[in-house]
Amino acid sequence: MKKKLYVMLIVVTLLGIAVPIYAQEAGLTLEGLAAKVEAMVELVTSMSERMATFEERIAILEATATPTVTPTPSPTSPPTPTPTPTSVSPTASISRIMNVRAGPGTNYPILGQTAVGDQYPISGKNPSGGWWQIIYRGQYAWIYSPLVTAINPELVQVASIIPTPPPTPIPTSTPIPPATPIPPTPVPPTTAPPQSDPCAGIGGDGCKFRLRNTDLRHNGGGDLKLYVGFVHEGRGDEVQGIGGSYYVELHKDGVHVAAVNNSTRGGNSTHQGPQGNKYNYLKTVPLNQVPGGNVAGNYTIFVRDGNGERDSQNFHFSVSGGNGEVWLIFAQNN
C-alpha cells in the first residue's frame, strides 16, 4: 500500500513540474502534452516494479541467513581442597640428635639421624614399647622411645611387621697353617692365633669406656650413693659428659636397679672425690628401691651414650653391708 502511494506522489509531482514547462514550449498541443505525461507514468511504473523485485530478493536473503551462535562459557569448578593431617595422629617430637634404625634395637643398621625440632608420624611400636616405629624418608624406621616426646601415644598399636634381628657376627679364629717339615736348622717359634674382640657384638661404640677406679666408702648402709666420673685419659683426664651426654645402667645380683636410668645424667659441674675433682654423675638410691632392701651384694654396671647405645662392656664390683658410698671413674683413651 505504501509503495502505491509513493508512485502516485511521484506522478503528481512530475505533472506539477512538467505541465507548466511543456505548456511554455511553442506549438505544444494538448494531445502532445498528454502523450508525454503518459510516457513519464510508464517510466515511473517500470522503476517501481524493479524496486519491488529488488526488495523481495533482499527479504529472501535475510530470511535464509544463518544466525551466528555465540558459545556460552562453562563454569569453572572450584579447586578441591587437600585434606591436612589432624592433630589426633600419634607423633614423635625430637628434642635431641639421635640415630634412626632399621629395627627396634641397637643391633639393627643405622638409616640416618634426627635433628632437634623434627616431628615424625608414629605408625607402631615393638611389644615392649621401648621403640617407636616412625615414617622416616618414606619408609618405616625405628627410634628409641625414652629419648623422644610422644604425642597421643595411647593410640599406638604394636606394629604388624617387625624386622627380624640381623644375625650376631661370630668371631672366627685364624686357621693355623700346616706345620713345615723341620729342616736341619732351628725352627722359629710359631705365632699364636689372635684373640677374638671382647667388645664385638655388644652394639654402640663397644669398649669406648673402661672402669678404671672403684672406691668404696662407709656410710652406714642407710642408702646407696653412686658417684661416677667420665674422663679422657688421652687428654689428661679431661672430664667428659658435662651437660648429660652419658649415663650408667646398674644391676644388683642380676636385678636391674630401676632408679639408675637415663633420666639421671652427668651434671654441669664436677665434685671432689677419691680421684680428684672428676665426678659429675651423682645418684642416691633409697633402700626401698635397692633390690633386696640393703646395699650389700654383687653389682654389674656399664655405660650408655645419649642415644641409649652401649659405650662399654659389663664391669663388676661388690659392696659389703656398710660401704654404701661407691665412687667410680670410667676412662677412655681414644
Image (spheres, rainbow, N blue to C red):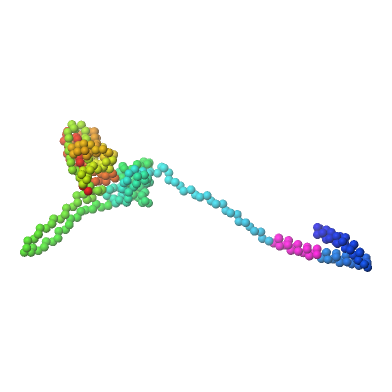
Figure check: 32 above or below 274: below
- The structure residue drawn at horizontal position 26% and vertical position 42%, both measured from the top left corner, is 241
List x then y, in percent, for residue 214. Answer: 17, 40
Q: Do we see residue 159 in this rendering?
A: no
Q: Position of residue 110 (x, y in %)?
A: 30, 51
Q: Quadrant of residue 49?
A: bottom right
Residue furthest to the left in view is 184
319 above or below 77? above
Residue at the image position 24 percent from the left and 46 percent from the top: 311
Residue 162 percent location from the top left of the image: 32, 49
- In the rendered structure, the answer to whether residue 123 lies left or right of residue 303 reads right
- The magenta region covers 47-64
**Which residue is depicted at the point 22% across and 39% down?**
278
Q: Quadrant of the N terminus?
A: bottom right
> Residue sitting at 17 percent across and 57 percent down?
174
Q: How many marks?
A: 0
Q: Nearer the viewer, residue 173 or 253?
A: 173
Question: Can residue 109 be seen?
Answer: yes
Give residue 14's quadrant in the image. Answer: bottom right
Main secondary structure type of the part rendered in magenta: helix
Residue 142 coordinates in the image, percent (x, y): 32, 48
> In the figure, is residue 44 to the left or right of 161?
right
Asked if the stretch drawn in magenta spans residue 141, the answer is: no
Residue in the foreground of this view, choosing between 48 and 155: 48
| Depicted 156 relative to depicted 171: above or below | above
